[in-house]
Structure formats: C-alpha cells, structure tokens
Image: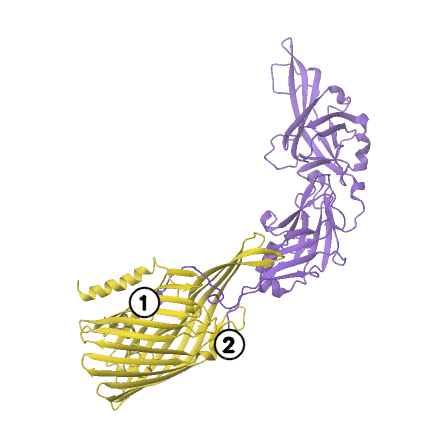
Chain colours: A purple, B yellow
Amino acid sequence: MSVPRLLGLLALVGVTACKETVTAPGLCPEFCLAGDIAVRDTVLVDAIVAESSFVGYRFAHTAATLQVGGPQGSGEARALVLFAPFAATYAGTDATVSDSIIAIDSLRIELAVVRRSADSGLTVGIYRLGIPPDSATTWAGVEPFFADTALAGTLSIPDSVRSGSVSVTLPPSAFPRFEADSFKVSIGLRVTSAAFVDLMSVDSGEAAFQVPTRIHRFVRLDSSGTTVTRSEVRAANFDTFVGDPAGLGPSVGLRVGGLPAARVMLRADSIPRSVVDSTQVIRATLLLVPARPAVGAPDDTFRLRAHALGADFGAKSPLLNEADTAAAGSAAVPVGSQDTIQIDVTHVLLSWRLSSKLPRAIMLRLDREARATAAVELYSSAAAGRPVLRLTYVPPYRFPGR
Amino acid sequence: MTPSRVVVLVLLGLLAARGRLAAQNSVYGVQGVGFPGRAVSAESRGLGGGNAAFDPGSALNPATAAGYSGVRASMSAATAVRRYTAYDSTITGLVETRFPLTMVGGRITGTPLSFAVSAAPYLERSFDFQTTGTAVLRGDTVTVTDRVSSDGGMSDLRGALAFRVRGMIALGAAVHVLAGSSKLRVQREFSSSEYRPFSQQSDLTFTGAGVSIGAVASLAPGLQLAGALRTDTRLRTTQENFPTVSVNLPVTATGGVWLQPVPRLLWSTTAQWRSWSTAQNDLGSSVTAFDTWDVASGLELGRTRPLRLGVRYATLPFSARPQQARDVTLSAGTGLRFAQRVYADLAVEHSTRSGAGANERVWYFAVGIAVVP
C-alpha cells in the first residue's frame, strides 16, 4: 500500500467516524446543561399603536346563509326570498297529462336549515312580501309586510332537526295574489321567539345540503279523462336578510362583523423586534375588551378571527393563508357578552418571524361574515380598554462562556 | 484463521456496531466545556497510559516524533460501554464508537528532523438527555419536558517536529490547532397545547490554538525521562445570533519515567497536570472548574506478543458541585505484528468514575493499527 493511499484511507475513516446517541434522563442540576430554558411572559399594553375599521367586505345577499333571528336579542333578522316564477300552465315532465291546470291544490315551502338555536319550539312565520326583494332592500322597506295580516303560515321546526330540510304545505289562499303576480312568490321569514335559525341561501356552496330553499306547486290536471295531481318546483331566485338597525344602535367603537361585514385592522408596529425576531414566541394572546355587549341574534355565538396580512393595502389587504383556519387564531363570542375576548395569535407572530416583509398588522373579522347580524365593537388604541398583546416567549439558549 | 484476519474482523465488528448501538459520552461531559479526550494510542491504553510521554503513537509529547525511523501511519478505533448512577437512577446501555486517534509520522529525508501529524480528541461534547418538570405559565402549572442534546466535540490537530541531540536527548515542538463543532439541540414541550413547543438548533463552532514543547532523555541504558509543556489559547465558541464567547484553556505539564530493567520487562509512568481551574471565571457560578491530575503507570511483559497491564488515576475538571470527580482505570492489552509492516494493538480498560453526585462505570475496548508502508 502506498503512503498516499494509506493517508486517503485514514482520512476517509476519520470523516466517517461517528456515533449514535440514546436519550438518557437528565439528572439536574448536576448533570444537566448549565443554564436554563427561560420562559418569559410579558403584557404589551402599547403594542397596538393604530387601527382602522373597514366596511363592506360581504353583503347579506351574497352570504352563504340567511339568518332569521328573534326580536329579544340585539340583532333581530328577517329573511327575504324571491322564488323563480311558475308558468301559467303545467310545465312538468309528465307527458301523459294535459298542461292546462284545473286547479292549484297547494303550495309547499321548503327550507334548508343549516344551524339553529338550542331552544325548543322554534317556529318560523312565513309572510307574503308585497315587493320583490333585492340587494337594496332595507329593514324599513319590508317592515310593513311583516304585519299579521300578511302572515301566510307558520313552519314549526321540530326540536330533533338541527340541520336539514323542513317544509310546510299551505293552501292556495295563503297567497291570494299568486296568479295576479304572474305566479311569482316572494316571502319573508320571521321568528318571534328568542331564537334564531340560519337557512341555506342560493349563494351557499355547501354541498352537504342538497335541498335548497324552494317552493312546490301541487296542481290538478287532466289525464285521459281522469283528474290527477302533479307537482312542480322552483328554487329561490334571490334571497337576502335584513337586520333591525335599532338593535345594533349607533357605533361606539371599532365594529367587526355586522351587515355589511366590517373588519378592523390593528397595527402592531411597536412590538420589540428583539422579541419577534430573536426569540421563539410560544404563545401570543390578543386581549380585546368589547366596548359594549356583543350584538346578534338571541342565543347565538359567533367566532372572531385574527389574521396576519400578506401586505398592507388598507381595506384591500390580503389575508395570509385565509383558507387555512389553523393559521388564524379565533375566539368564540357569545351574543350579549362583554367579557374580554382572548384570541391566540401565535401563528401571526410566527409568520412575522418567518418574513420580515410582512406588515406587523392583524386583521380581525368574523368567521362567517355577513351570515348573521352578529357584531362586536372594540375600543381603539387610544382608549383605556385598548387591545393588548400578551406574549410568552423563550429567548435563545446561549452556550456558557463569556 | 490468520492473526491478520482476526484484526480485520475486529475492525469490521467495531464499524458494524455503529449501526445498532447507541452512544453517549461520559455523564461528566455535560458540564463545563466538555469531557477531556485522551491523545493516547491503543498500545499506551493497554499500559493505562503509562508510556504516553514516550510513545510515538501518542500525541502528548512532541519529542516522541524523533522515535520514527521511517514513515508510519496509525489509527485506532474504540467502543465504550457505559452505565452510570446518579441520585436513585441507573442508566445503562450507553454505547459509543469512536476513532479517537489518527497519526502519520516519519523521518524527513535529508534532515535530522522527524515529523508527526495527528488528530486526537481534545474535548467531547456528546450527550442527549431528557428531563421533566413543571413551570408556572400565566398562573397555571404546566408540565414541561426538556430535551437537550449535543453532538460533536473538538479535535486537536497537531503538527510536530523533533530531532535527536547526540542520540541521547530528543527535543520536539508542536503546533496545535483546535477545531470542532457541536450541534446543540434544545427542545421544550408543554403539557398544554396552548403553548407551542420550543425548539432551538444551534451549530456551535469551536476554535483555538496551542503550542507544545517536549523532551525525552535517555539517562542510562533502560532508563528514560520525559517532559512536555503545552499552553493553549482561549477556546472561542461561535453560536449563531450571539457574540462569540471564549473559555480559558489550561496549561498542560507532562512528565514521565521509563524503565527497562531486563529485556522482557518495561515499566513506565506518565503524570500530567492541567490548569483547568483557569476556566472558572468564564463558566459562571453553576459550574466548578478544577485543576486535574492524570497519573498512569504500566507494565509490559514479553516482546513478541507482550502482555500489558496498567492502572490510572485521574481527576475530572468540571462539576456542578464543589466536589471533584475522579477516575480510576485498570487496563490490559497486547500487541501483534504481521508481515513486518503491520502492527496491531488491543486494549481493554475498565474505569470507575465517581464523585460530584454520580458513579459511572465504563468498559473501553480499543484496537490500534499501525502500518509501515
């Protein structure tokens, strides 16, 4: 063996020399590493230096659900539905019958319940709307049509139904202007008890509910000299819901939620960079004190989310990982509560640490924007109850020496 | 089976052991800057390290490089099996395989000089342990599980030159470069899911340098004395996001006596003192640094296939208590020679380390191969 080859072999052996380790229980302090993993906790009362409130992210008529809430809460809501018109003749698929309608037997209103309050005896009143609703329809504009004289019928939702389809069959007399209105039906839905129900809207993308809000017409037809009954169905052409503005009242703080949906951006530029960049934040909590009890339908609870931003474009700031619910901390807020809201924003601070280019700002929004009248109002950074950030972090471990 | 095949099989066995055994360095290496390594050959380990001050295959005394008559390359491989007891816990099955010493030396043609280049362990920083405790976070008591592991150490890369004066005295000097790294992982997990786990991984880089001088004197036939002195700079440790820190390294003084009263009997003793206490100011109050003594003595019986026996007493430099730990080692070994060009040395040691709150027992198996091309 030549000397160079021998040296090469020795070098190779030296490089590949290694070992494996097994974890042994540490016996402190004698046989633990000098120095401790220090955990520090601090409350940054001046972390939020500015804020902005933006309105108009989503409107009720584009929401995935329609809320019908009772008047006992601070956010009474009524749903408005315009169904697609029927034809003057039978337009069904049965070719063995005559298309001339002998008589209308009944009309069935079918609703798709997505969510409801926990109480029993939930009843929805179905009212005849004298006008077709549209996106500009207001509470005041439809208020006259919710008089007792306009009540077409009621639909009792069994206590066993937490979600799914419910229906009620009404006589033709429930809609006396059905023929005069060119076979169009528009209804208003109202709950008079301290309860709420969320219904699937035409804008819902929730595939779990295959039966949307719709209306069935049962008609009598001639079939070779025999009178038979056939049905036709029409889906909703348009739906929306309106909230009682008196329940929300004048704004006293920074509103998140409501109709149309509002968001609040909190700017946290004063958080020490030494904390965000050089330590590991193991828990960060945003503490929010509502300026007044949370508003919404009675017995409702909504979820407030805190997002990091991809960029600061004011109201149009893109939310970072918006679709990833794990990337945004959230807190459940019961309607009527004024307790301090605690939202975990650890992921937000982690994203700031990973990218220094991200704006040090947090966007607050409701989890289900414009699906309900629910809203919470917060104090500004100048008020005594301003948002506060509580951080628990671990400074990096330092090897002993000086 | 020929002896050469036996040696090859032993080496292969050590290499294969890497894949299925687990390893940790001494429990006494957790504190301070680590556990001091030994720059001694497998031959010397069989003697407890008694001849280390005279052994060209060891890297304690640069003057021993004058002992090379031609080019010689050597390396050693070793496996340590440890168990230790601390408090009421006994931890067993800790195994480590290393290639602790590699050396190439020889005469420089046309000059009276000899050289030796070696790589030896200076400090070991390999451990992995887990602790469980509680912490009060935001007013709540949370169970925390900490895991701290370090993988790496510092090597002592030495370049030595030596020459003989009238054949009676060998003088040598060496330059040492200390280099190494350690992957430090610190993790903490919380019993509450509200807290994210803390995890930090740091690459520590160690640098330093040193110089040493030494002499070996043949006072009479069968009698030699040796002495060496070494001083090192501060050990600089670089950790990302932190200023570089440094720790004082010790002055090392080595002395030895070598006696061969009859041709088939050798007795040698090497003593070493290191001023590790000078690191105290750099390590803080949680660690106590002590000066250390390392005294080893060995007997070698026979020449062709000698029997080596040794005993060693050493004190350890770092402790979390104001009590210094000590190490008592008994050793045995032998040597084989193949085809006039290959030398193999086998050694086994049993060490008992105690003090400073623990008791550690180590079986250490070493094999050294030297080749004369």
What label does residue B364 carry, if any?
A: 1
Q: Do labels 1 and 2 share a chain?
A: yes
Q: Quarter-wise, where is residue A40 in the image? A: bottom right
Which badge, 1 or 2, comes first in the chain's sequence? Answer: 2
Q: Nearer the viewer, residue B215 or B363?
A: B363
Q: Classify A137 as above or below B153.
A: above
- Does residue B259 appear left or right of residue A250 in this picture? left
Chain bearing mark 1: B
**Amino acid type of the residue that numbered disc 2 sits on in the rendered structure:** Asp
Q: Quarter-wise, where is residue A86 in the image? A: top right
**Amino acid type of the residue that numbered disc 1 sits on in the rendered structure:** Tyr
How far is disc 1 from disc 2 in space, using C-alphas?
Answer: 32 Å
Rendered residue at 74%/29% (across/down): A125
Q: Is mark 1 on a helix, strand or loop?
A: strand
Residue B193: x and y in percent read 56, 51
Chain bearing mark 2: B
Residue A44: x and y in percent read 68, 61
